[in-house]
Image (cartoon, grey):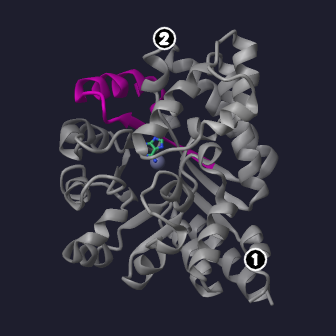
């Protein structure tokens, strides 16, 4: 094929699984720490990067929650989101659905309004300046209890029109989807979409719970679903999208090596897999780097790459006309590539 790296860089794509707090690059972290007088346990930017060596999800989450302490003012949230959206647009991301973790901020005394006003202003400016479309998904922290998630949803209600759905993230093991059944039911009754991280470190049963109890419309990660043939058959039959994050899986030791990544097996099983960056500032790459790493390790063909990008549009929370427009742009791009 054409140079795969160039083909991937220009590929029209959607990002469906990125935590805005996970786009905090060490340079911005250090700059915001200085601006806000927040002490960081690192001497400089290199020391921040050097600390990013994780044995599992919890190792990462400990640094992720520490890192977000530098976010204090509305302007900080604006700068964070703007930096991500500029990079996304440069990588031909046409649409981004972005998680935010309100509890990671409000539990430190930052008003919900500060967080959402900063993110929202950046999304609107980026849409005008860069031409991509964006949405927000409010994610509940699963290591906290359901009552806290309920309070967070209550607190978000004045801004109901600014987010399209709810998600579930943070420490997976020991925090099954069943813990959040009621708050997800309420969110769905408000017309919100539902997604949940499941099967990243947790067992296939958590993926089933996300489907049956939370009635999600996408599974975030889903890797461990492959351990259960009946579940794979169901996910394929229901065409349930999986938002897969290759560099995240590598850096959190969900896979031992990128050559062992299950992405091709997912496609071969008929699953609607997509490629995403999760926490790009912590895991070594944005969308293009994720596609390139997994393409190279697995030798993905151009057709497989186009299928993955097509899945990202099909699985997006976009109206049918927008999906068809993006799919047509993708088909034209693929046809024009030598
Ligand atoms: N929060 C941010 N990134 C996450 C991940 N990969 N899994 C669970 N929670 C997260
Ligand atoms: Zn995630």
Q: Which mark is residue 7?
A: 1
Question: Residue 291 in magenta?
Answer: no
Q: Label 1, secondary structure: give it.
A: helix
Query: Does residue 313 show up?
Result: yes
Query: Does residue 138 show up?
Result: no
Q: Residues within 10 Å of mark 2 (few under 14, many from 20)?
A: few
Q: Which residues are magenta?
A: 134-160
Determine the residue positioned at 28% across, 75% down: 232
Q: Quadrant of residue 299?
A: bottom right
Instruction: Between residue 235 and residue 46, name the one nearer to us.
Output: 46
On screen, residue 98 versus residue 233, left or right, reads: right
On screen, residue 61 versus residue 237, left or right, reads: right
- The quadrant of the picture occupied by the N terminus is bottom right
- The quadrant of the picture occupied by the C terminus is bottom right
Determine the residue positioned at 50% across, 44% down: 54
User: Residue 157 at what x, y percent from top left?
Assistant: 40, 26
User: Residue 195 at what x, y percent from top left?
Assistant: 37, 51
Q: Which mark is residue 21?
A: none
Q: Residues within 10 Å of mark 1 (few under 14, many from 20)?
A: many
Q: Quadrant of residue 42?
A: top right
Work out whether 181 lies above or below 117: below
Q: Which mark is residue 109?
A: 2
Q: Label 2, secondary structure: give it.
A: loop
User: Residue 108 at what x, y percent from top left?
Assistant: 48, 14
Instruction: Between residue 162 and residue 170, name the one nearer to us.
Output: 170
């Amino acid at each position: 094929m054409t140079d795969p790296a160039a083909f991937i860089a220009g590929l029209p794509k959607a990002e469906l699984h990125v935590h805005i707090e996970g786009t905090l690059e060490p340079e911005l972290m250090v700059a915001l720490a200085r601006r806000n007088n927040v002490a960081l346990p690192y001497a400089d930017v290199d020391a921040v990067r050097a600390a990013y060596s994780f044995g599992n999800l919890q190792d990462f989450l400990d640094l992720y929650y520490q890192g977000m302490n530098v976010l204090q003012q509305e302007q900080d949230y604006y700068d964070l989101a703007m930096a991500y959206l500029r990079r996304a647009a440069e990588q031909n991301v046409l649409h981004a659905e972005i998680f935010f973790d309100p509890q990671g901020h409000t539990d430190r005394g930052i008003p919900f309004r500060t967080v959402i006003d900063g993110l929202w202003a950046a999304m609107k400016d980026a849409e005008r300046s860069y031409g991509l479309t964006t949405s927000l998904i409010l994610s509940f922290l699963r290591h906290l209890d359901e009552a806290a998630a309920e309070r967070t949803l209550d607190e978000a209600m004045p801004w109901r029109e600014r987010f399209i759905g709810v998600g579930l993230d943070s420490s997976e093991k020991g925090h099954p989807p069943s813990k959040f059944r009621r708050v997800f039911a309420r969110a769905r009754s408000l017309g919100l979409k539902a997604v949940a991280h499941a099967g990243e470190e947790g067992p296939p049963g958590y993926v089933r719970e996300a489907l049956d109890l939370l009635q999600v419309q996408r599974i975030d990660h889903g890797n461990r679903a492959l351990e259960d043939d009946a579940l794979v058959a169901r996910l394929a039959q229901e065409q349930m999208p999986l938002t897969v994050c290759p560099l995240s899986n590598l850096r959190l030791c969900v896979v031992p090596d990128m050559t062992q990544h299950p992405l091709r097996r997912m496609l071969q099983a008929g699953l609607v897999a997509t490629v995403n960056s999760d926490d790009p500032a912590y895991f070594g790459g944005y969308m293009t780097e994720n596609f390139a790493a997994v393409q190279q390790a697995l030798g993905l063909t151009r057709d497989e790459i186009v299928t993955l990008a097509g899945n990202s549009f099909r699985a997006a929370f976009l109206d049918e006309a927008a999906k068809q427009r993006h799919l047509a742009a993708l088909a034209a791009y693929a046809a024009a590539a030598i």
